[in-house]
Amino acid sequence: MTRLLYSLTLALLSPLILLYLYVVRGKKNTGYKQHFAERLGIYDTQRVVKQPVVFHCASVGEVLAATPLIKRFIQTHPSESVMVTCNTPTGRAQISQSIGHDIAICYLPIDFYFASKRFIKRFQPKLLVVLETELWPNVFTHAKQANCSVCVINARLSEKSFRGYQKFPNISRWIMASIDALASHNEQDAQRFIALGLTEEKVTVTGSIKFDIQPNDADIKAAKQLKAEFSGRPIWVAGSTHPNEHEHVLAAHKQVLQSHPDALLIIAPRHPEQFDKVAALLTSSGLTYCRRSQTFDRHSQVLLADTLGELKMLFGCADIAYIGGSLIARGGHNPLEAAAFAVPVLSGPHTYNFAHIYPELLTLKGATTVASQEQLAQRVCALLTDEPQRQKQGQLALQCLKQNQGAVEKTLDLLNRQLN
């Protein structure tokens, strides 16, 4: 009865869901209109991959986190077909860029009963690997019925999300019954999943695979080359910024310029549809700027990063990194790409989406919290003035990263057990 009610509810809401994706999201990003039939489980017959291991990464952040794991899986399982699915056009582009154009890529269908059934029937996956909290009841159930194991990896469940699932105990038990193995960030996350009905024997605490990142030679070379273009100017990067936050960052940079007139801000909006909006804000602010997609103007006070997939490299050429989504209540973004380059991290107070990372990073003093644009400007100025402190904080950030690595190998062991 629970599954029937859930599926009927989604069916009734389907016109609104599809209109929202095609019209509302499609207006902001035309990529949402492409490959739209895949949202309904209808795929190009020219590229059917049979019995793949499917890795589902919702969007860009999950793709970046999963890339080391997927590459290691491909390396250690050369005979297995691999497919990577996602929910967003930016995620799709990131898969091609991070993992390769030759990998099979498609959208995971919306969790409509027949759409999810078509997906499982078409590809007949042998293993479905889902990152974090992408828990889709119909997809999971159809997979189980087709003898496809379901693994949830890098799993996290905040106290707020846990309370939300508790309000729908029948759906929660249904989802938990469909999971064969779960790799959680920590013991607290594990206990929350168990409290929702997941059998304790199915849970393994592996830590977060987001710590298992390491700049490759190409990243390091590109960062050095870009930094050389800036002729020794002090650089701070504001990565993954959001509306109502862009303005705070630009205002903070104006304050920074008063004491460091040659400072360069690289601002990287979280979503491509924000590129032109940030350009308009820069024009009205009076700050001189240029775009990353165009020739660099050495007189610019701001570089607008209007390209995809370069944020890690941009952090690599920075002296200081501010991680966006945190001065406003968006829950923050991943600070570990900056930490991997030993760059000191600044963040606003709203980091609840990364509660498994920030507490230790802050305790080790690899990151500093700022509560306002004024504090952001003050901290940037202080670090730009004090090079030894800047280097020390960057090394502490890197130390935090290194001492938490190892989750990729633990997760690979778990996936191997499911395949066998």
Image (cartoon, rainbow, N blue to C red):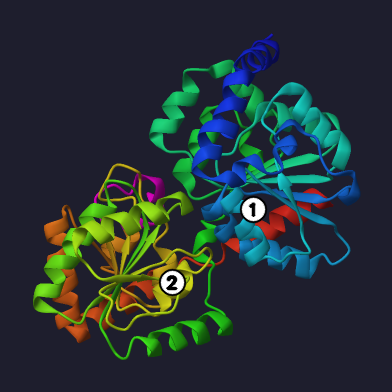
Q: Position of residue 121 (x, y in %)?
A: 87, 34
- Residue 234: in magenta span: no
Mark 2: which secondary structure? loop
| Vertical placement of residue 359 versus 395, above or below | above
1 or 2: tag closer to the N-terminus: 1
| Crowdedness near tag 1: few (<14), some (14–19) or many (≥20) residues, C-alpha within 10 Å | many
Q: Which residue is mark 1?
A: 92
| Vertical placement of residue 249 versus 108, above or below | below
Q: Position of residue 414 (x, y in %)?
A: 70, 53
Q: Nearer the viewer, residue 268 or 141?
A: 268
Q: Position of residue 57 (x, y in %)?
A: 62, 49
Q: Which mark is residue 12?
A: none
- Residue 352: in magenta span: yes
CB within 8 Å, label 1 to label 2: no
Residue 80's quadrant in the figure?
Answer: bottom right
Residue type at mark 2 is: Arg
Q: Residue at x 25, y 82 (%)?
A: 234
Q: Residue at x 56, y 49 (%)?
A: 59
Q: Residue at x 67, y 28 (%)?
A: 111
Image-based side of 381 in relation to 109, left or right: left
Q: Which residue is mark 2?
A: 292
Q: Nearer the viewer, residue 340 or 329?
A: 329
Question: Magenta segment range?
Answer: 348-359
Asked whether residue 333 is in view, the answer is no
Residue 30's quadrant in the figure?
Answer: top right
